Amino acid sequence: MSDKAVLTIDGKTFELPIIKGSTGPDVVDVRKWYADSDTFTFDPGFTSTASCESKITFIDGDAGVLLHRGYPIDQLAEKSSFLEVCYLLLHGELPTADEFSKFDHNITYHTMLHAQFDRFFEGFRRDAHPMAVMTGAVGALSAFYSDSINVDDAREREISAHRLIAKMPTIAARAFKYTIGQPFVSPRNDLSYSENFLRMCFAVPAEDWKPNPVLTRAMDRIFILHADHEQNASTSTVRLAGSSGAHPFACIAAGIACLWGPSHGGANQEALEMLEQIGTVDKIPEFIEGVKARKYKLMGFGHRVYKNFDPRAKVMQKTCHEVLGQLGINDPLLEVAMELEKIALSDPFFIERKLYPNIDFYSGITLRAMGFPTNMFTVLFALARTVGWISQWKEMFEDPARKIGRPRQLYTGATERDYVAIDQRG
Ligand code: SDX
C-alpha cells in the first residue's frame, strides 16, 4: 500500500501520510487534516477510526483472531492463569518465575480494603443492582487514595494498577454479599486470585468453605477471556477520562458505568434473560421471527469487530460444558442456546449481517451454574476487564504524543440569531 493518501476538495489536493502497524489495517494520519483543510472527518461510532496506537491487544474480526501481546486467546485460556495474563497485559511479556512470584505477592497483599470502606455499601438499598454498587464503590475508592495518583509517575501508575487489580475481587464480592444480605468475607493470602474471589462470594460463617478446583479453573479462564479487547466502548471511556489526568480509580469507575450498557458488558445478563424468555427449543422459530422483524436483538450475538466467530465464545462454550458436566447440571437453557446458535448460523438474516455468537452468549449459562445470579454477570466482566482498562490507561501515559481527548462535531443546529423577549414570541 502507498505511504500517503491523496484527497482533493474544490480542486485543492491534500496528501495525508499512511502509517503502517505491525499487523492489521494501516491508518491514514488525519491529525493535521483540520488545520490544513478547515474540515473535520466524521465517524460518530468510530467504525473507521483508530483512536490511538497500542501494543496490547490485536483483533482480526474477519479471521476471528484475538491476540494479547501476540499470544492467541485460546492458548492463554488453556495454558496461562489470569494473574499471569494481568502481568502480560501490563508489562508486554510473560513473566519469569521470579517476576511472577513478586507480582503475585504484590497483588495478594493489596486485596484488603480500608475498614471504613465497608460502610459505603450500607448507603445502597439491598436491591441495588450490583453494577450500580460497583460504579459507586470504585469511584468512592478514589477518596481513600490520595497518594500514588501522580499519573505522570510510572511507579505511581504501577501502584494504582496493582491496587485496582487486587481490590476489584474484594469489592465485587462485597457487592454480591450485600445484595443477598450475607456477611462480608475477607480475602485470604493463602488462596489464589480466583479461589480467593470464589471464597469471598460463597463462603458463609455457618460452615467451612470447600474449594472446587474445576470451578476455580473455570473462573480463572472466564477472567482471562474478559481481560482486554482493544479499544471497545468501556476501554475508550477509561482512556478518554484518563486523558484529562483524572484519578485512576475514577477513570475505572467511568469504565464500569459504560460496560454496564446492554449493548456492551450488560449483554451477558440480557443474553441469559433472553434464553429464559425463550424457555424451550420449540419457541426458537417464533423468537427468531421477532429478531428479523427488528422487535429485539439476539443478545450475545453480533460484534462491531468480529464478523466471524468470537474466539472467546468458542472457549466459553467449552468451559460451559465442562462446568455443567462437573456439577452434574443438565441446564435446559444450554440446549436452547446451542439450538438457537445452530438455527441462527444457518439463517440468511444473520449470515448476511455476519452475526455470530460473541463472548456473552454462553457466559451466562456457565456463571449461573457456578452460583452467580444474573445481576452479577456484568460485575464479573468488570472485575476481569479492570486489568485491560488499567493496562490501556498506563499505555496512554507512556505515549509521549498523549493529548487530552477532545473530538469535534458536525453542527446542524440553529445558526446565530437574536434573543426574543417572551411577550414577543409567537
Ligand atoms: C461486548 O467492542 C467490544 O470489543 C465489546 C466486547 C468486549 O470484550 O469489550 O467484545 C464485549 O460488548 C460484546 C457485544 C455484546 N453485545 C451484544 O451481544 C448485544 C447484541 N449485539 C448488538 O447490539 C450488536 O451486534 C453490537 C452492538 C454488539 C454491534 O453492533 P454494530 O457493530 O454497531 O452493528 P450494527 O448495530 O450496525 O448492526 C449491523 C446490522 C443491523 O442490521 P440492519 O439495520 O443493517 O438491517 O446487524 C443487526 C443490526 O440491526 N444486528 C443485529 C444484532 N447485532 C446487529 N440483529 C439482531 N441481533 C443482534 N444481536
Image (spheres, rainbow, N blue to C red):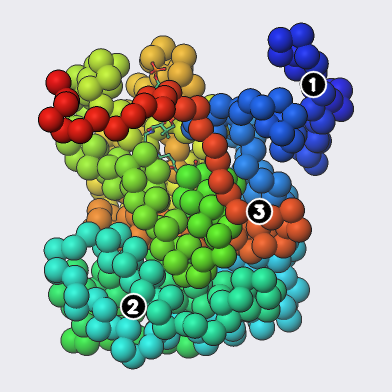
Residue at image mark 1: 14
Give the CA distance from mark 2 to mark 3: 40 Å
**Residue shown at the point (33%, 78%) measured from the top left:** 200
Q: As rendered, which of 417 and 48 lies closer to the eye?
A: 417
Image location (x, y in percent) of residue 406: 56, 46
Going by the image, does 104 lie left or right of 358?
right
Residue at image mark 3: 403
Q: Amino acid at mark 1?
A: Phe
Q: Quadrant of ligand 1?
A: top left
Q: Secondary structure at mark 3?
A: loop
Disc number lying in front (1 or 2): 1
Going by the image, does 231 lie left or right of 56?
left
Image location (x, y in percent) of residue 57: 65, 49
Q: Amino acid at mark 3?
A: Lys
Q: Of label 1 and label 2, which has the lower sequence position?
A: 1
Mark 2 surroundings: few (<14), some (14-19) or many (≥20) residues within 10 A: many
Residue 271 to residue 235: above or below: above
Q: Secondary structure at mark 1?
A: strand
